[in-house]
Image: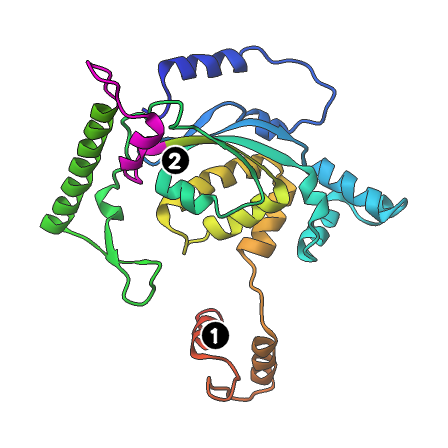
Amino acid sequence: MPLTPEQLAEIDALRATPRPTLRAVSEGMEAHLYKAAPVLDHGFVRVIDYMGNDAAIVQAARVSYGAGTKKVNDDSGLIRYLMRHWHSTPFEMCELKLHVKLPIFVARQWIRHRTANVNEYSARYSIMDREFYIPEPQHLAAQSTVNNQGRGAVLEGAEAARVLEILKSDAARTYDHYEEMLSQDGQQGLARELARMNLPANIYTQWYWKVDLHNLFHFLRLRADPHAQYEIRVYAEAIARMVADWVPVAFGAFEDYRMGGITLSGKAIAVLKRRLAGETVTQEDSGMSKGEWREFTEVWG
């Protein structure tokens, strides 16, 4: 179960007692506040707090631009200009604090995004729950033969069943041993900070993760990408849906220029110019490596 009955009751109580405020709010994000969006089999993402909205981005930009800018650009146009030209500071004026429940192996990938504040559930002080991520059969895949970080064909039949059984039995056995080592029945028991070392990487942990919008967009650009690992991508997609309601103008610009846009190298631009001039260009005379040329032709043919 992603949330306990006690946690659900707490969320209902928090949402049942709204308070007036003088600070800027986002009606879209207010609808998400405190609620948990389920992810994977036991995980979730929920908004604990946020600061700012689309107007906060514009306000910050106009302070730095000086008086008179408001007459030149409307809010949407200014936000799109800032995104298009890779301005960062105005987007840093907005912040989001999330409560996330996720498998440890996903957390270790996620923590590579170091431009955030994190406080994680401590297995030194508390006992971990018996909850493990077990993939759905359609997400069990062999190692890719062309990408060392990717997946290949989906496992089927007996092989898929064998792998699932290994995952389930190993998780259950390691947790049984974890409990045995913590046991206080007639013995002292192993310290929690030591007993945790035997737990598998698919056990669930939880953390609070606070990040500004500029760095959140960077996270989403990498982790909501179709090439990202499925188990972290579904978290990024859940967060993206919340951000789209929080700062719809900024998120629209982000989708257009970052998620839907392409950055071209100088060599790629030169090739396009030559093609437009009617010249036939091959990889050998493009100046690109085979990998660059493959990626270029996947987009431009």
Q: Which residue is mark 1?
A: 292
Q: What's the residue type where badge 1 is placed?
A: Glu
Q: What's the residue type where badge 2 is placed?
A: Leu
Residue drawn where x is 16% and y is 46% of the image:
163
Q: Earlier in the sequence, mark 2 or mark 1?
A: 2
Q: Which residue is mark 2?
A: 102
Q: Position of residue 242 (x, y in %)?
A: 53, 35
Prevailing SS of the magenta stretch? loop
Q: Position of residue 267 (x, y in %)?
A: 58, 78
Q: Position of residue 43 (x, y in %)?
A: 37, 32
Q: According to the image, what is the colour scheme of the structure?
A: rainbow
Q: In the image, is residue 197 part of the stretch drawn in magenta?
A: yes
Asked which secondary structure carries label 1, the reply is helix
Q: Is residue 217 left or right of residue 57?
A: left
Q: Is residue 197 left or right of residue 96?
A: left
Is any part of residue 88 visible from this angle? yes
Most foreground residue, 133 or 112: 112
Q: Can you say whether 212 is above or below 253 in the image?
A: above
Is any part of residue 224 visible from this angle? no
Asked which secondary structure carries label 2, the reply is strand
- Gap between marks 2 and 1, in whole Å? 35 Å
Quadrant location of the C terminus? Answer: bottom left
Q: In the image, is residue 98 part of the stretch drawn in magenta?
A: no
Q: Which residues are magenta?
A: 182-204
Q: Position of residue 175 (x, y in %)?
A: 23, 30
